């Protein structure tokens, strides 16, 4: 069984996964886009995946949403902290193609294969770190 978050950004993949024969259930997940049960050396494990486009990854890094602080200023309040507290194993799935422009700024491939510089001026080197 694959549980898929029922919000925009996740639920659109449910029909495609179902066509591949994956048993799907749409539910509200507090953290993650997908969740499933796995088998570990000591028993059952809860596994999750967070799906991000290159643009969303950059944005969530820049505004602190991914790794940042919560509203009270405590660290670990970002998406990664929530994922790590909620699941035994976590995957971050990054979709898209990226490269550097001549100045080292990050570019991502957009619609129709057109490359565009990512807002915020992040470098490819910063992203890969």
Image (cartoon, rainbow, N blue to C red):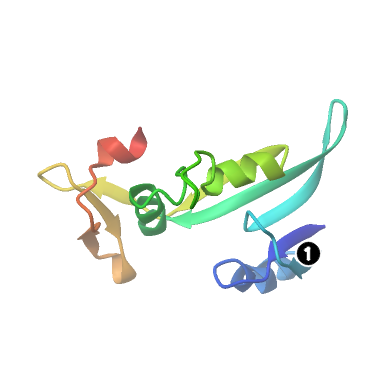
Q: Position of residue 60 (x, y in %)?
A: 40, 53
- List the single residue furthest toward the left: 103
44 relative to 42, above or below: below
- List the single residue furthest toward the front: 72
> Which image quarter is the N terminus in?
bottom right
- List the single residue furthest toward the top: 41
Residue density around tag 1, few if under 14, some if 14–19, many if 20 or more, within 10 Å: few
119 relative to 87, above or below: below
Q: Quadrant of residue 23?
A: bottom right
Along the line of sight, the residue nearer the viewer: 29 or 89: 29
Q: Look at 29% across and 65% down and name the residue there.
A: 113
Q: Look at 60% across and 66% down and name the residue there.
A: 10
Badge count: 1
Q: Position of residue 29 (x, y in %)?
A: 69, 60
Along the line of sight, the residue nearer the viewer: 75 or 104: 75
> Which image quarter is the C terminus in?
top left
Q: Look at 85% across and 25% down and name the residue there.
A: 41
Along the line of sight, the residue nearer the viewer: 104 or 69: 69
Q: Position of residue 73 (x, y in %)?
A: 46, 44
Say whether residue 2 is left or right of residue 111. right
Q: Position of residue 6 (x, y in %)?
A: 67, 71
Say whether residue 66 is left or right of residue 2. left
Say whether residue 97 is left or right of residue 19. left
Q: Quadrant of residue 120?
A: bottom left
Q: Quadrant of residue 96?
A: bottom left
SS at circle 1 = loop
Along the line of sight, the residue nearer the viewer: 39 or 64: 64
Kindly identify which residue carries mark 1: 21
């Amino acid at each position: 069984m694959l549980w898929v978050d029922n919000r925009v950004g996740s639920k659109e993949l449910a029909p495609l996964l179902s066509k591949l024969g994956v048993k799907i259930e749409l539910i509200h997940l507090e953290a993650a886009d997908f969740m499933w049960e796995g088998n570990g050396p000591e028993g059952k494990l809860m596994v999750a995946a967070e799906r991000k486009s290159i643009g969303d990854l950059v944005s969530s890094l820049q505004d602190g949403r991914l790794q940042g602080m919560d509203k009270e200023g405590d660290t670990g309040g970002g998406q990664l902290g929530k994922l790590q507290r909620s699941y035994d194993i976590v995957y971050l799935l990054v979709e898209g193609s990226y490269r550097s422009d001549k100045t080292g700024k990050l570019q991502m491939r957009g619609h129709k294969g057109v490359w565009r510089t990512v807002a915020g001026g992040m470098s490819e080197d910063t992203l890969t770190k």
